[in-house]
Image: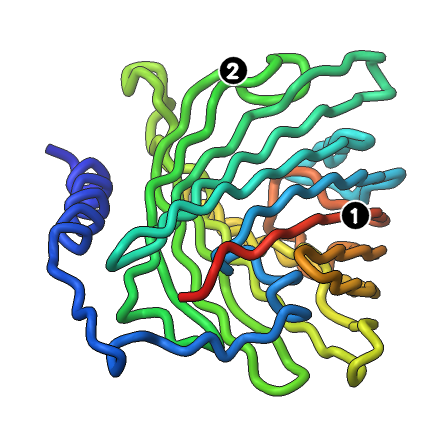
Amino acid sequence: MKIKYLFIIAILLFGFSIQAQEEDKSDEAIQQDDQDRASKAMDATATQWSFQLAYQWMPSYFSDDVNGSPRKPGLDNYLQLRVVAPVPLKSMTILPRVTIRHYEDLSTGKTGIGNTEIFALIIPKFSDWGTGRAGIGPLVTAPGNKDVSKDEWGYGFAATAVNNSGQWFYGLLFTQSWRSVDPSTLQAGESDANPLGIAPFLNYRFGSSGFYLGTADMVVLYDWNTKGFYLPIGARFGKVLVKEKASWNLYFEYKTSAVYKSWEGPAVQNSFRLNVSYTMPVGKK
């Protein structure tokens, strides 16, 4: 059996084994929640319901040559809906997250739903230290409209580690998936591995004003087949509004491509995003 199958099975078994353990019910074993509500509003790994609506506009792409041909541009824009539905258990928290995007290609006039991304981050209690946490879980991508995305399934894993320290909030998200395709359809020397994704983020909050400055939604990509490397760069400015039982996170960001010469895919030149998120924390940990 291939290593990727064993890895995904191991993740699932890891989660079930943690849930089967007996939790210590003494007061000393109860972990204190040291993360404030403002940083939670920016934290996709906190135990809370999260509803995100974002609009991404990519009006221009770099048009340099790739292997002797002009680099192909990407899609023009998309509308994104992301929902996180926490499942708090005795000895761990599971964070299922669903991301749906509707893309538009102005050059062809075609639109449609892209590949839907679903992953369930498993965060055991021992890797949740109050101001941050680490977790790992299975990842699945469902087929999308072939005019704007891949018409195929994907499967793999996602892992993350985040921390809150004073006015700083930072972390990393890793994703790796494989295409569910017939191996006989692959070209010589080509694997079924999708590019490795690494998403670093760093945010700084300005006192208790609710305003913050941080990195944009930057996903660094490495293509296992072509050895290509892609590094976007950008900044985000936002404001968190903490209410009695819920919080709002509003932000605007700009992004461009910093390193893309060895990357054979599209390289965005100018990208803008408007975002609104609504979060509702679930109890205490």
- Residue 114 visible? The answer is yes
Q: Nearer the viewer, residue 43 or 1?
A: 43
Q: Which residue is mark 2?
A: 151
Q: Which residue corresponds to the image point at 49% horizontal and 41% vertical from the top-left?
A: 85
**First in sequence: mark 2 or mark 1?**
2
Q: Using a 10 Å C-alpha cutoff, classify the residue at mark 2 as few (fewer than 14 neighbours), some (14 to 19) or many (20 or more).
A: some
Three-letter residue code for mark 2: Asp
As helix, strand or loop, the secondary structure at mark 1 comes to: strand
Residue 262 falls left or right of residue 80: left
Three-letter residue code for mark 1: Asn
Mark linked to residue 275? 1
The answer to which quarter of the image holds residue 264 is: top right
The answer to which quarter of the image holds residue 155 is: top left
Q: Report how far apart the C-alphas of labels 2 and 1 lie in the structure.
A: 27 Å
Q: Which residue corresponds to the image point at 29% horizontal and 66% vertical from the top-left?
A: 125
**Picture layout, residue 155 above or below residue 152:** below
Q: Quadrant of the N terminus?
A: top left
Q: Quadrant of the C terminus?
A: bottom left
As helix, strand or loop, the secondary structure at mark 2 comes to: loop
**Picture layout, residue 21 above or below residue 228:** below
